[in-house]
């Protein structure tokens, strides 16, 4: 199985930590879902999605375990997962766990997949940040929830932000740029680009800035992979495909 499987080099040395940002290659789906679509409910054949999930889990080394996903709703709800038999955590855009052998998955096709870990405590979290999630500050909220639930200091949190639509391709209207600036002020201004009368948003950078504001150290924040809309061969992109597309998965968890 020939996967696009991007990782944080610094995390590969963490014994027991498995993670990655997967791309679209190496699966069985056809047409707009070709080929490693891991999302149900986007129009792909559910049996093929099941087979893709099974093949993918084998390939990344969690064959006998589950990867818990969420019913992502573009808000800022974050749930804790303790049960490693669970497949679906429920309606949320973030999940976290301090349990071993619980793998957390997030599905995206332009939105920012965010993976978080506290290596010395073997805690993991995953979140999905589209523009609505970014507006409500889900990245910062995840760091706050880690502190509240597990008593971890934000400076011990490490973060990776994966392939997502870049400022090269993500043109936004005032319906996005205005509330974003009202809510995030200077942070939003740093993430907005203006060119030929158009406005573009660097969604990943705005999430990175939110993490920094929440206390995550810049040197422990990693940006992984290209713009999903530019990298057609490797990643699904909702914008590029005008909504008819598959979703790639990003995942994280501790084996032991
Ligand atoms: Zn691009």
Image (tube, rainbow, N blue to C red):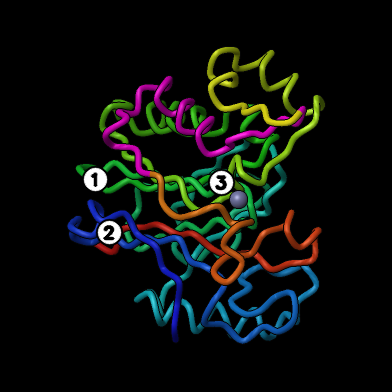
- The mark lying in front, picked from 1 and 3, is 3
Q: Quadrant location of the C terminus?
A: bottom left
Q: Earlier in the sequence, mark 2 or mark 3?
A: 2
- The mark lying in front, picked from 2 and 3, is 3
Q: Residue at x 29, y 41 (%)?
A: 118
Residue designated by label 1? 119
Residue designated by label 2? 17
Describe the element under mark 1 as helix, strand or loop. helix
Give the image quarter of residue 28: bottom right
* Real-space Cα separation, disc 2 to disc 1, in angstroms: 8 Å
Residue designated by label 3? 112
Categorize mark 1 by other alpha carbons within 10 Å: few (<14), some (14-19), many (20+).
some
Give the image quarter of residue 153: top left
Residue contact between numbered discs 2 and 1, judged by CB atoms under 8 Å: yes
> What x and y, as percent, mark residue 6?
39, 62
> What x and y, as percent, mark residue 47?
69, 85
Categorize mark 2 by other alpha carbons within 10 Å: few (<14), some (14-19), many (20+).
many
Give the magenta part as a residue range. Answer: 197-222
Q: Earlier in the sequence, mark 2 or mark 1?
A: 2
* Real-space Cα separation, disc 1 to disc 3, in angstroms: 22 Å
Q: Earlier in the sequence, mark 1 or mark 3?
A: 3
> What x and y, as percent, mark residue 149?
41, 32
Residue 240 lies left or right of residue 105; in this view the side is right
For label 2, being within 8 Å of ligand 1 is answered no
Q: In this view of the protein, which residue sits in the foreground, 94 or 158? A: 158
Q: In this view of the protein, which residue sits in the foreground, 67 or 232? A: 232
* Real-space Cα separation, disc 2 to disc 3, in angstroms: 21 Å
Q: Is residue 59 above or below residue 154?
A: below
Q: Residue at x 48, y 48 (%)?
A: 126
């Amino acid at each position: 199985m020939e996967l696009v499987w991007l990782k944080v080099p610094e995390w590969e040395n963490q014994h027991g930590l498995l993670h990655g940002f997967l791309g679209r290659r190496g699966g069985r789906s056809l047409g707009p879902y070709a080929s490693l679509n891991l999302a149900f409910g986007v129009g792909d054949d559910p049996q093929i999605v099941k087979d893709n999930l099974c093949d993918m889990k084998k390939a990344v080394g969690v064959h006998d375990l589950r990867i818990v996903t969420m019913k992502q709703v573009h808000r800022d709800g974050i749930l804790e997962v303790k049960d490693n038999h669970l497949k679906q955590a429920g309606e949320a855009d973030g999940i976290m766990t301090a349990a071993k052998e619980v793998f957390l998955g997030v599905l995206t096709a332009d939105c920012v997949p965010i993976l978080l870990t506290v290596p010395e405590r073997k805690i993991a979290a995953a979140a999905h940040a589209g523009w609505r999630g970014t507006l409500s500050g889900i990245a910062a909220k995840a760091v706050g929830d880690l502190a509240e639930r597990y008593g971890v200091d934000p400076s011990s949190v490490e973060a990776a932000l994966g392939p997502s639509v870049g400022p090269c391709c993500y043109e936004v209207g005032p319906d996005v740029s205005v509330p974003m600036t009202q809510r995030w002020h200077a942070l939003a201004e740093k993430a907005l680009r203006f060119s030929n009368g158009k406005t573009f948003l660097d969604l990943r950078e705005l999430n990175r800035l939110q993490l920094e504001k929440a206390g995550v150290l810049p040197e422990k924040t990693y940006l992984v992979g290209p713009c999903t809309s530019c990298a057609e061969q490797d990643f699904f992109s909702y914008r590029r495909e005008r909504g008819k597309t598959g979703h790639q998965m990003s995942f994280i968890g501790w084996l032991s």
